[in-house]
Image (spheres, helix red, strand yellow):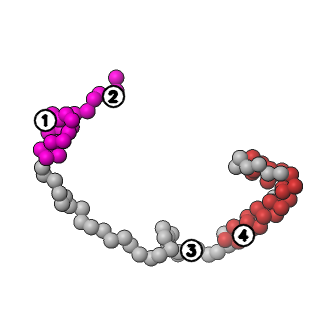
């Protein structure tokens, strides 16, 4: 795919990048090379290949989802500035 100066200028404006006129030819060539490489990637046959979330084929170790602490609300609420009926009391913020 070949890009012209006007397209490169439009891309630079969208990216909010200031590009001088003398740099447009060089950037057009660079961007065209990048797009050509991306087009080559679309030719790769990926049928039957599962999508990956990582290049390493490992899974994270998981722990059991059980409560390992707690059961003492009076200790938790002991340092609360204000508490009522076993809950933190906070000032009203919505009118």
Q: Which residues are magenta?
A: 73-95
Residue tagged 3: 47
Which residue sits at x=83%, y=51%? 20
Considering the whole magenta stretch, tell me its main secondary structure.
loop
For marks 2 and 4, give the CA distance.
Answer: 55 Å
Q: Mark 1 vs mark 2: which is more N-terminal?
A: 1
- Residue 50 x/y as whole percent: 50, 72
Tag 1: Cα neighbours inside 10 Å, few (<14), some, or many (≥20)? Answer: few
The residue beneath circle 2 is 93
Quarter of the image where one finds residue 87: top left
Q: Is residue 32 magenta?
A: no
Q: Earlier in the sequence, mark 4 or mark 3?
A: 4
How far apart are the alpha carbons under marks 4 and 1? 66 Å
Q: From mark 2 to mark 3, how far is it between C-alphas?
A: 55 Å
Residue 35 drawn at (x, y percent):
73, 64
Residues at badges 2 and 3 in contact (C-beta under 8 Å)?
A: no
Spot occupied by residue 82 in the image (x, y as percentages of width and height) = 19, 34
- Looking at the image, residue 38 sits to the left or right of residue 60; the answer is right
Q: Residue furthest top?
A: 95
Location of residue 6 with respect to 39 vertically, above or below? above
Residue 15 seen: yes
Residue 23, picture quadrant:
bottom right
Tell me the element at label 1: loop
Nearest to N terminus: mark 1 or mark 3: 3
For the residues labelled 4 and 3, the Cα–Cα distance comes to 20 Å
Circle 1 residue: 85
Q: Secondary structure at mark 4?
A: helix
Q: Residues within 10 Å of mark 4 (few under 14, many from 20)?
A: few
Q: Which mark is residue 37?
A: 4
């Amino acid at each position: 795919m070949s890009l012209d100066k006007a397209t490169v200028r439009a891309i630079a404006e969208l990216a909010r990048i200031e590009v001088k006129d003398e740099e447009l030819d060089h950037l057009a060539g660079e961007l065209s090379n990048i797009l050509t490489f991306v087009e080559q990637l679309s030719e790769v046959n990926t049928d039957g290949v599962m999508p990956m979330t990582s290049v390493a084929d490992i899974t994270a170790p998981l722990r059991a989802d059980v409560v390992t602490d707690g059961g003492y609300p009076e200790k938790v609420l002991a340092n609360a500035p204000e508490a009522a009926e076993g809950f933190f009391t906070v000032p009203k913020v919505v009118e």
